[in-house]
């Protein structure tokens, strides 16, 4: 059995299909841009490795289902979905394209690299730029916003209330 | 599947994984009780988010436990079909929420414990446990940031918030000895490099807690009359009521699914 890692012609199509699967909670961004798809293998049949963002993320099963549907419809009923938890997901895996899409959607992307150390969660002490006007004169309203991965902020310059995607 | 399942007299590794799983599951269920009742919307979100993380951790651990058991049970079977005496959780996590101060004090003590525990377990000789620990460790750290933040703010807050935090800590203190107890199961697993050494966890927990207490202007209670038994299935009456609610559906309608 050949196990081809990364992007070969066989796996390229799968990557392209997965690019169309939106994150259920932030549908503007795909599960590829969010870093949930860890890898695609060719083991005679396509294997998709996905990782949960948070242990308790209620969207994980929904994502699996959406991946299954997209691959089924594209003629890959034999595709296998494998959940991996190591290494643990980090916001560092959100792509540049993903960050741009978040900002356009009105969500401030993670401000710093989570790998740089502990205690960055929540972005305390970091300048979070308003996704609407770009001002960094923003303040945190609540450490927890509409989902576990977001904090709630308000812009002091344009008064826009917005979600901030926390570093993890 | 009908009736209860019995996982008593488990082999050490299964026993240990069930202890970790039950701590997460029981506290996750407790925190979930704040849903719809939080003192402020933001705090309710925080507590319920922590509950979700803990239930997620419990699921990973119970799935692993079910594999170790090898009896064809699922994570759900282990969560919903075991009786109270078959739960291995610490007494600390089954205590009712009481007020916000009590919930925060308990959370802070537990998060501090989990942070040290999962930090150690990332180096466990059991690779599956090490993977779960790496995931849970990140979550425990941000839980602690929140619970310790509130602990200090309430302790060093108004006369009433200070008094409530002190009263909560006084009440809960006798349930903290159990965190660092050791028995044959853990001693054997520590020697094998699989479990975390409770003695190591204790000194780090003590140091960090003292720092929080100083900042919160809260007094450390005396270590007397420590309660024990949770790990061995001897629980307070509170666990039974909680399981009656948590397990009701699967008990009343065995095998029911979405
Ligand atoms: Zn603005």
Image: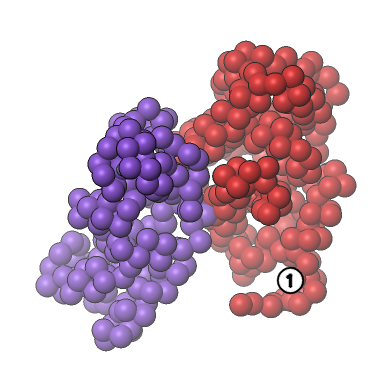
Chain colours: A purple, B red
Image quadrant assignment for residue A98: bottom left
Q: Looking at the image, which is closer to me, A55 or B125?
A: A55
Residue at (47% x, 67% y) in the render: A61
Decide if residue B191 is in sight here.
Answer: no
Instruction: Tell whether B170 sits left or right of A9.
Output: right
The image shows residue A71, relative to residue B53, as above or below, that is below
Q: How many neighbours does mark 1 have within 10 angstroms: few (below 14), some (14-19), or many (20 or more)?
A: some
The residue pinned by badge 1 equals B250
Q: Quadrant of the C terminus of chain B?
A: bottom right
Give the residue furthest to the front: A158
Residue at (69% x, 78% y) in the render: B256
Instruction: Tell whether B68 sits left or right of B221.
Output: left
The image shows residue B62, relative to residue A65, as above or below, that is above
Residue at (51% x, 61% y) in the render: A58
Circle 1 SS class:
helix
Residue A67: give x, y in percent of width and height.
35, 73
Residue A137: give x, y in percent of width and height.
33, 33
- For ligand 1, which image quadrant applies? top left
Residue at (24% x, 74% y) in the render: A17
Give the residue furthest to the left: A9
Image quadrant assignment for residue B185: top right
Residue B36: give x, y in percent of width and height.
68, 54
Residue A71: give x, y in percent of width and height.
30, 79
Decide if residue A74 is in sight here.
Answer: yes
């Amino acid at each position: 059995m050949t196990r081809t890692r990364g992007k070969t012609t066989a796996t390229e199509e799968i990557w392209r299909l997965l690019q169309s699967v939106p994150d259920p909670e932030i549908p503007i961004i795909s599960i590829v841009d969010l870093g949930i798809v860890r890898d695609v293998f060719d083991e005679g049949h396509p294997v998709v490795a996905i990782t949960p963002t948070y242990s308790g993320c209620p969207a994980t099963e929904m994502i699996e289902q959406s991946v299954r549907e997209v691959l089924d419809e594209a003629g890959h009923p034999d595709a296998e979905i494998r959940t991996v938890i190591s290494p643990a997901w980090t916001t560092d895996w959100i792509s540049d394209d993903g960050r741009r899409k978040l900002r356009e959607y009105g969500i401030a992307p993670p401000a710093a690299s989570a790998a740089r150390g502990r205690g960055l969660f929540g972005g305390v002490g970091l300048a979070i730029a308003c996704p609407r006007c770009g001002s960094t004169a923003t303040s945190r309203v609540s450490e927890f916003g509409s989902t576990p991965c977001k904090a709630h902020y308000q812009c002091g310059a344009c008064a826009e209330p917005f979600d901030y995607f926390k570093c993890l | 599947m009908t009736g209860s399942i019995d996982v008593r007299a488990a082999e050490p590794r299964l026993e240990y994984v069930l202890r970790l799983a039950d701590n997460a599951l029981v506290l996750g269920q407790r925190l979930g009780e704040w849903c719809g009742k939080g003192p402020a919307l933001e705090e309710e979100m925080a507590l319920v988010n922590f509950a979700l993380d803990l239930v997620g951790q419990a699921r990973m651990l119970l799935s692993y436990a079910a594999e170790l058991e090898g009896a064809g049970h699922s994570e759900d079977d282990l969560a919903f079909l075991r009786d109270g005496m078959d739960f291995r959780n610490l007494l600390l996590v089954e205590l009712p929420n009481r007020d916000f101060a009590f919930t925060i004090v308990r959370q802070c003590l537990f998060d501090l414990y989990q942070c040290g525990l999962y930090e150690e377990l990332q180096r466990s000789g059991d690779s599956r446990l090490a993977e779960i620990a790496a995931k849970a460790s990140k979550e425990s750290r941000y839980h602690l940031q929140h619970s310790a933040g509130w602990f200090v703010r309430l302790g060093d807050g108004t006369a009433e918030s200070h008094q409530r935090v002190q009263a909560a800590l006084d009440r809960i203190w006798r349930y903290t000895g159990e965190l660092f107890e050791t028995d044959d199961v853990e001693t054997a697993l520590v020697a094998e490099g699989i479990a975390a050494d409770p003695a190591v966890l204790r000194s780090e927990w003590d140091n960090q807690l003292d720092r929080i207490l100083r900042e919160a202007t809260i007094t450390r209670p005396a270590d007397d009359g420590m309660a024990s038994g949770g790990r061995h299935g001897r629980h307070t009456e509170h666990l039974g009521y909680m399981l009656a609610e948590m397990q009701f559906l699967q008990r009343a309608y065995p095998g029911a699914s979405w």
